[in-house]
Amino acid sequence: MDIRRAIEERHSVRRFLNEPIEGEALERLEAAIDGANRESGLHIQLVRDEPGAFTGLLAHYGRFSGVQNYLAMVGRKSRGLGQAVGYYGERIVLEAQDRGLNTCWVGGTFNHRKARYRVAAGEKLVCLIAIGYGEDQGKPHRSKAMAKCCELGSHQMPAWFAAGMEAALLAPTALNQQNFMFMLQDGQTASAFSTGGLFSDVDLGIVRYHFEAVSGHEVIAR
Ligand SMILES: Cc1cc2nc3c(=O)[nH]c(=O)nc-3n(C[C@H](O)[C@H](O)[C@H](O)COP(=O)(O)O)c2cc1C
């Protein structure tokens, strides 16, 4: 997968064509979900041909149309659940983007009563990700300045860190809040924390994935 291209070309898409996900695209998507669930212990489910979750006032308010498929981001209740959902969900989102599919993370603007997914004892639903073939490719979001989202101490910014920051700033975040901070420790280790807000733990997982995938450096979450 061309990860940089997927990151640059991904934008939230809320209006979808009436075109089912099938064939090789479906196989790759299912493989990405299975891989994420195996590694993380999450219980991410692909729900297909099920428009109910995107009917009603909230979905309308969220400007969604034609959503037939979504990922239900389910996992065991724990402190790390939100971050794991963000990290592994975004890995699937970028795999889907690479395969020509479009997505939108959805924390609030869906019909909670009509969403279809399975939750085992001790698990909960964190959010959905709408997925399918978009009417368009979306558009780039407004972004904070890089300097507002990282601290370098007395060090120069290494090239790998700059590449990671650029990728993090292209990531989806709830309400486009970009409430995260990356730190360069001892000039060679990256760590990151959230500065708060709605779904901030999911956001932190998402931006960590972008940073790691492009920089090749692991990020310590704080
Ligand atoms: C955790 C999370 C929850 C989100 N919830 C919603 C939502 O409920 N409704 C919606 O329309 N967009 C939602 N979004 C999409 C964001 O508004 C979008 O990612 C942000 O504006 C940046 O735009 P981009 O994804 O096109 O780069 C959510 C994004 C994230 C990461």
Image (cartoon, rainbow, N blue to C red):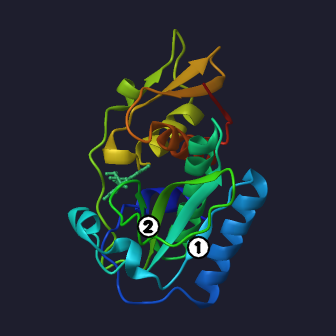
> Quick check: 17 above or below 221?
below
Looking at the picture, does residue 29 appear above or below residue 87? Answer: below
| Label 1 C-beta lies within 8 Å of the nearest ligand 1 atom | no
Residue 56 at x, y percent in the picture: 27, 72
Labels 2 and 1 touching (C-beta < 8 A): no
To which residue does mark 1 refer?
46
Label 1: few (<14), some (14–19) or many (≥20) C-alpha neighbours in 10 Å: many
Q: For numbered disc 2, what is the local secondary structure?
A: strand
Label 2 vs label 1: CA separation? 13 Å
Horizontal relation, residue 112 to residue 175: left or right: right
Q: Residue at x 49, y 77 (%)?
A: 100
- For the N terminus, give its image quadrant: bottom right
Residue at image position (62%, 17%) is 185
Q: Residue at label 2?
A: 103
Queried on whether the Cβ of the residue with tag 2 lies below 8 angstroms from ligand 1, the answer reads no
Above or below residue 167? Residue 89 is below
Taking the view exactly as shown, the residue that stands out farthest to the right is: 38
Q: Percent x, y for residue 74?
A: 60, 57
Q: Is residue 165 above or below residue 104?
A: above
Residue type pointed to by label 1? Leu
**Residue 187 sits in quarter:** top right
